[in-house]
């Protein structure tokens, strides 16, 4: 089965086509192309399709026919979230609407002047979260913890057509120097965003049940968040209609320095989100591989 290798599929040409259609013919034209792209991925992205089938059929207990249709819907909505991210970041934010569920938790943590850590997942469209936060507090600054192994040409192209806004990228480094950057960001009362659902082979991990089956989770986000004396929230930004998004925020109650308890809370919140938005989990690899 496929393992996550740290980068996503796609080409610069593909992104250029979507951006051209969106800018010249509107959002609907870019969405229209996706109906064919999603169909293509169902048959030619065999590893991710196989992993996705396991998620729907074995973990969510869908029938075979519903599992196959859900795979197509998942690819479709994933493509739409990418287009939305580009649209919102390139000046089309007014075409979208947003609502908050727990947004006051983020405001309250910022008032404490000690920064905060937000743990999310590869669900919905978390990368547009900064547009929510700017409505809560226009002075909010965000640092996003990420790897630096995505396709460089795609990154450069997207940077040329979008507005980076108030997001600062903190690159995860082998010498752990990114820890100093995280501490500095928290000292400036910034929000540090981390995803907790993508384990890379060979790295340290914690094991916890998700949807009735044990899985590996990267230990770093949970150890780090549990040791720093700052508020920890679980945050998800989910697509509900063509142009409407819903932000969910929940505050962790786990005791400090208890990474496993924090992970348990996280998986509980993620389970709830996956059952509510089953087609919006975009971890296209064998997440529940053998843990022994």
Image (spheres, helix red, strand yellow):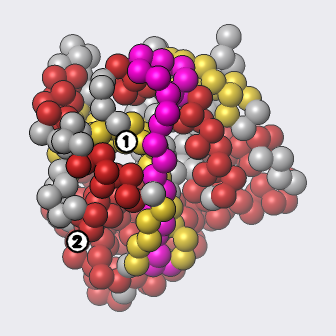
- Label 1 crowding class (10 Å Cα cut-off): few <14, some 14-19, many 20+? many
Given this view, does label 2 or label 1 mark the residue nearer the observer?
Answer: 1
- Say above or below: 54 vs 204: below
Q: Is residue 215 left or right of residue 239?
A: right
Q: Is residue 60 left or right of residue 81?
A: right
Q: Quadrant of the C terminus?
A: top right
Q: Which mark is residue 90?
A: 2
- Label 2 crowding class (10 Å Cα cut-off): few <14, some 14-19, many 20+? some
Q: Is residue 62 left or right of residue 27?
A: right
Residue 228 placement (x, y as % from top left): 30, 24
Residue 101 placement (x, y as % from top left): 48, 62
- Tell me the CA gap for discs 2 and 1: 24 Å
Q: Is residue 289 shown to the viewer in this render? A: no
- Say above or below: 290 vs 164: above
Residue 50 placement (x, y as % from top left): 69, 42
Identify the residue under disc 1: 118
Q: Residue furthest top?
A: 292
Whether 148 is among the magenta residues is no
User: Measuring 35% from the left and 19% from the top, which residue is drawn there?
Assistant: 227
Residue 21 placement (x, y as % from top left): 35, 80
The mark that comes first in sequence, 2 or 1, is 2
User: Measuring 21% from the left and 30% from the top, which residue is drawn there?
Assistant: 182
User: Measuring 50% from the left and 78% from the top, which residue is drawn there?
Assistant: 242
Q: Quadrant of the N terminus?
A: top right
Q: Which residues are magenta?
A: 242-263
Q: Which mark is residue 212?
A: none
Q: Is residue 111 shown to the viewer in this render? A: yes
- Say above or below: 233 vs 32: above
Q: Quadrant of residue 119?
A: top left
Using the image as rendered, state which of residue 255 and residue 246 is in the foreground.
255
């Amino acid at each position: 089965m496929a393992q996550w290798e740290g980068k996503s599929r796609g080409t610069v040409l593909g992104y250029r086509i979507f951006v051209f259609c969106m800018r010249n013919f509107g959002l609907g034209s870019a969405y229209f192309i996706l109906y064919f792209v999603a169909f293509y991925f169902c048959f030619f992205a065999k590893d991710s399709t196989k992993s996705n089938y396991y998620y729907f059929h074995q973990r969510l207990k869908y029938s075979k026919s519903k599992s196959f249709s859900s795979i197509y819907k998942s690819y479709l909505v994933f493509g739409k979230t990418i287009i939305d991210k580009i649209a919102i970041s390139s000046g089309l934010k007014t075409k979208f609407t947003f609502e908050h569920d727990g947004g006051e938790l983020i405001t309250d943590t910022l008032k404490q002047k000690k920064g905060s850590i937000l743990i999310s997942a590869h669900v919905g469209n978390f990368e547009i979260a900064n547009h929510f936060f700017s409505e809560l507090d226009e002075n909010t600054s965000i640092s996003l913890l990420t790897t630096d192994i995505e396709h460089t040409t795609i990154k450069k192209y997207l940077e040329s057509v979008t507005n980076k806004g108030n997001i600062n990228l903190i690159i995860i480094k082998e010498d752990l120097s990114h820890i100093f950057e995280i501490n500095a960001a928290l000292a400036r009362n910034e929000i540090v965003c981390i995803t907790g659902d993508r384990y890379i082979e060979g790295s340290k991990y914690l094991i916890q049940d998700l949807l009735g089956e044990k899985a590996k989770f990267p230990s770093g986000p949970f150890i780090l968040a549990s040791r720093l004396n700052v508020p920890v929230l679980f945050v998800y930004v989910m697509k509900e209609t063509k142009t409407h998004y819903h932000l969910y925020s929940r505050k962790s109650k786990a005791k400090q320095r208890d990474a496993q308890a924090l992970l348990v809370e996280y998986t509980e919140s993620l389970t709830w989100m996956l059952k509510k938005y089953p087609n919006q989990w975009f971890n296209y690899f064998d997440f529940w591989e053998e843990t022994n």
